[in-house]
Image (cartoon, rainbow, N blue to C red):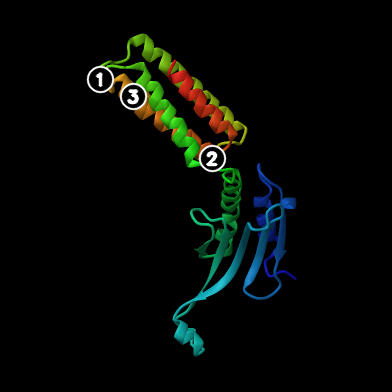
Amino acid sequence: MPRLKRSVRSAILFNLNNEHFSEHDFNVSFSEDGNRLVEIVFLALPKYSFVIEEYTEGNIYALAMGDSKDSRKYIRSVEIPGDYYHKEANKHEDVNKAVGRVYDWIINLREDILHSKEKSDAELNEMLDSLDEAIDGKDYGEHEYFSEAEKEEIFSQLDELNKRIQELEKEKYVEPSKVKTIEDAIEKSKTEVDQYPKVVWYKIAGKKLTSLLWNVIKNDEAQRLAADVFRRLMG
């Protein structure tokens, strides 16, 4: 019989059934003995796994001599991928907190898959160089600022960009936390329209938004969207 009771096993399966995957996308092994309590492997790409296990933390010399009075047993989750690294181990006070990490692991897993189709730095740099050339070709004066009509047009284009980002969120191309980052950058770019001359705004805001889209969305849609930002902002 599995060491974890039925309600805990059900909670793990519940976390696997979400808007992205179902429990049938994973191989879930509940252990009957040993330190390992459960191992979850993503069937489509078995390199991704999640393990909950018991481990003892303390003086290794005392433990080797059989003295456990200064040691303490913890629960930890070993996750591939982790929040920041390919493999991470997180310590928990109890099993329930470890089970709560399952959904975080799902998000990390999905994000890693979406990012697997990396756009090369060379492609992005080429696009940013094209923006520089386009701006320099306009021959803006060092102290030339946007007119009221031009500001209204830029705001309109930025609002359209914001709307498209929200659509990508609904289509599951962008995580909600990343959407907030893009929205904040768009709003900041709006405030800077009054602060910077045209040449400075285009080179700062244009590059910033394009790089952000490219690095956050990480798929073909990002390239099309980034190119569209160029075209619209440049009129």
Measured as percent of width and height from the top left, residue 128 is found at 43, 31
Residue shown at the point (66%, 65%) measured from the top left: 38
Q: Earlier in the sequence, mark 2 or mark 3?
A: 2
Residue shown at the point (41%, 22%) measured from the top left: 134
**For this view, does 62 lie left or right of residue 118?**
left
Q: Quarter of the image for the N terminus: give it.
A: bottom right
Residue shown at the point (44%, 27%) measured from the top left: 130
The local crowd at label 2, few if under 14, some if 14 to 19, many if 20 or more residues have their Cα within 10 Å, is some
In space, the residues marked 2 and 1 are separated at their CA atoms by 34 Å
Choose between 214 and 61: the one closer to the eye: 214
Residue 4 location, quadrant: bottom right
Q: Which mark is residue 133?
A: none
> Is residue 24 among the parts visible in the rendering?
yes
> Is residue 178 among the parts visible in the rendering?
no
Residue type at mark 1 is Glu
Q: Which residue is mark 1?
A: 142
In space, the residues marked 2 and 3 are separated at their CA atoms by 25 Å
Q: Is residue 105 above or below residue 186?
A: below
- Depth check, mark 3 against mark 1: the one in front is 1
Residue type at mark 2 is Lys
- Depth check, mark 2 against mark 3: the one in front is 2
Q: Which residue is mark 2?
A: 119
Secondary element type, mark 1: loop
In space, the residues marked 3 and 1 are separated at their CA atoms by 11 Å
Choose between 11 and 61: the one closer to the eye: 61
Q: Which mark is residue 201?
A: 3
